Amino acid sequence: MKVLIIGSGAIGAFIGGVLAKSGQDVTFLDLPEVVERIKSQGITVEGIGEKIHIDHPCAISSVDDNSRFDLAVLSVKSYTTIPAIKNLPVTIADFIITFQNGIGNEEILAEKFGKQNVIAGSITYPVAVIGPGHIKIENQKGGLGIAPMDPTIDIGEIPSLFQKAGLNVETYNNYRSLKWSKLMLNIVCNATCAILGMTPEQIFSDRRLVGIERESIRELLNVMKKKNIPVVDLPGYPVKLMKNVYSLLPPSLLKLVLKNRIKKSRGDKKPSLLIEVEKGSKITEVDVYNGAIYESARKTGIPAPVNRALTDILDKITSGEVDWSELKENPGKLIDACK
């Protein structure tokens, strides 16, 4: 199968590397300087069985109107979705699948390529970047979730394509359930860590901050209930159990129940939003995480003050409107803002 990988960061390199190793005809599409690096250094993936190294993979910086693939995989940050697909022909592939986090990417793709051609994807493998083009899967607990936007469409051999590459794959018939359930995992100890410059372990050592985490999840669940989006388990992650834990337990018990689990699984690992802030990024994915929860709540007439506060504060930090140093390791200010 001819596969186009749009964006060769952590997820793009991971998916493209394992598919190429399994015998698929893989082409990477990225910026010219990235293309040169890929061609010279190759792609390395560790942690999925044997160590994979793809020497001199096919990499391009543009496509023309005659370019045609069986599958296109979008793996760029959500805030670059529109520029990433701007110059792609509508007929670029039979299907385009997005493994991006957050809410709204599928709708952007459907507007250009048609709902019947778009597949929602989710990755729960813990992917770590060792170096440019060098990816490590830290354990094989997770997997891929796949759901066509239009559940009546037959996506054929696409799930088996990833299975043959050695990946754990689950298919779903409700793409919103897949993406909103994954969002529940994405927002835990993410915006709070980024705002405070703290680790997940530090967040779950403070009952007040656990309360903020709990309320952000409860607001998400309220939106899902209002929009009639069922929670589903994801590969390696019992999200339904997570829903019950965050819904029923007060912050003090939640801290006791989850502190050791958080320490073991995430501990001092920096979440994605904190990494972006530390890099000096002027924009993060908070708008498609906590921001998406607040916007959906607002449109359905229910409150989501904690997710609104987390989004506004982090956006002001990255834009320079708020001095990050005033909030770093200062939980009191964040707690006051979320009241």
Image: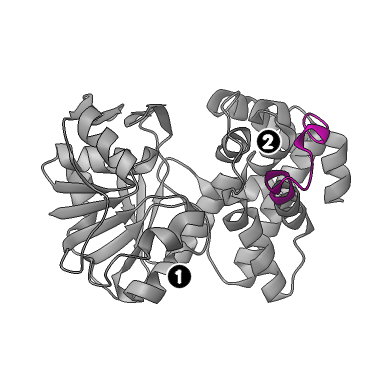
What type is the residue that disc 1 sits on? Glu
Which comes before the other along the chain, label 1 or label 2?
1
For label 2, the SS is: helix
The residue tagged 1 is 107
Which disc number belongs to residue 185?
none
Whole-percent x, y for residue 136 in the image: 35, 27
Q: Is residue 18 left or right of residue 233?
A: left
Which residues are the magenta region? 315-330
* Marks 1/2: CA–CA distance: 29 Å
Residue visible at 61% across and 30% down in the picture: 262
Residue visible at 63% across and 49% down in the picture: 244
Whole-percent x, y for residue 273 in the image: 60, 41
Whole-percent x, y for residue 198 in the image: 70, 29
Q: Do callouts 1 and 2 mark residues in contact (Cβ within 8 Å)?
A: no
Whole-percent x, y for residue 126 in the image: 43, 34
The residue tagged 2 is 193
Q: Is residue 17 left or right of residue 109?
A: left
